[in-house]
Image (tube, rainbow, N blue to C red):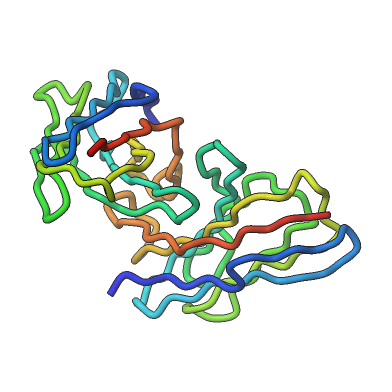
Amino acid sequence: DAKTTQPPSMDCAEGRAANLPCNHSTISGNEYVYWYRQIHSQGPQYIIHGLKNNETNEMASLIITEDRKSSTLILPHATLRDTAVYYCIVRAAREETSGSRLTFGEGTQLTVNP
Amino acid sequence: DTEVTQTPKHLVMGMTNKKSLKCEQHMGHRAMYWYKQKAKKPPELMFVYSYEKLSINESVPSRFSPECPNSSLLNLHLHALQPEDSALYLCASSQDRQARKTQYFGPGTRLLVL
């Protein structure tokens, strides 16, 4: 799986958009970009994933650059409950190799301030 | 419903004890996973079951013994653990092992080995 690079920490004001970047410059054409978050001492929570196109759901938007070498997770109106570690993960599409794996990096600690 | 349940929530055991962790899902998922998460570190994959058969063992010591008695249930049997095995143990499930199928996590069992 391609390696990802995320800033170790970010701050955001409550009510503002939180934009979390992820670099995955070695991503290959069949690899998905997944985002999870983990609130302190809880299990990781799925947020969103994409392959090539931008995606939006009720939690967030995922913007993937045209060359797919980086992506940004956008939380449009951050709340205090969005304070968590956010993980950007690249997964190979081939089941028989590493498609099963979620290989977590160190993630970004997002702190939403009042 | 994307719920994965894990019991117990907390477990304290001695190095000579035998205990088991339980994970359950009723989403009809046919892939189930065990991850281990040490304090302040990201989760790391331990085992993958696909259609009740063990498909990936990430070189986990034999003192951890997984079992998948049916498609809804995943156990992790623990025996002769060491204090360094203290961690949060996370279970996850997905429809199957393909990368485009999202893994959903349970809340975890926090294990302390004395």
The residue positioned farthest toward the front in the image shown:
A114
| Left or right, residue A96 beside residue A53 | right
Q: Quadrant of the N terminus of chain B?
A: bottom left
List x then y, in percent, for residue A17: 12, 35
The residue positioned farthest toward the top in the image shown:
A25
| Left or right, residue A34 beside residue A71 | right
Q: Quadrant of the C terminus of chain B?
A: bottom right
The residue lying toward the viewer, choosing from A99 and B83, is B83
The residue lying toward the viewer, choosing from A33 and A43, is A43
List x then y, in percent, for residue B54: 59, 62
Q: Residue at x 49, y 76 (%)?
A: B24
The residue lying toward the viewer, choosing from B52 and A79, is A79
Q: Residue at x 75, y 63 (%)?
A: B12
Residue A62, above or below A45: above
Q: Residue at x 10, y 44 (%)?
A: A55
List x then y, in percent, for residue A107: 39, 32
In this rendering, the count of numbered labels is: 0
| Left or right, residue B47 beside residue A105 | right
The residue lying toward the viewer, choosing from A19 and A88, is A19
List x then y, in percent, for residue B45: 55, 47
Q: Residue at x 45, y 48 (%)?
A: A40
Quadrant in the picture for residue A67: top left
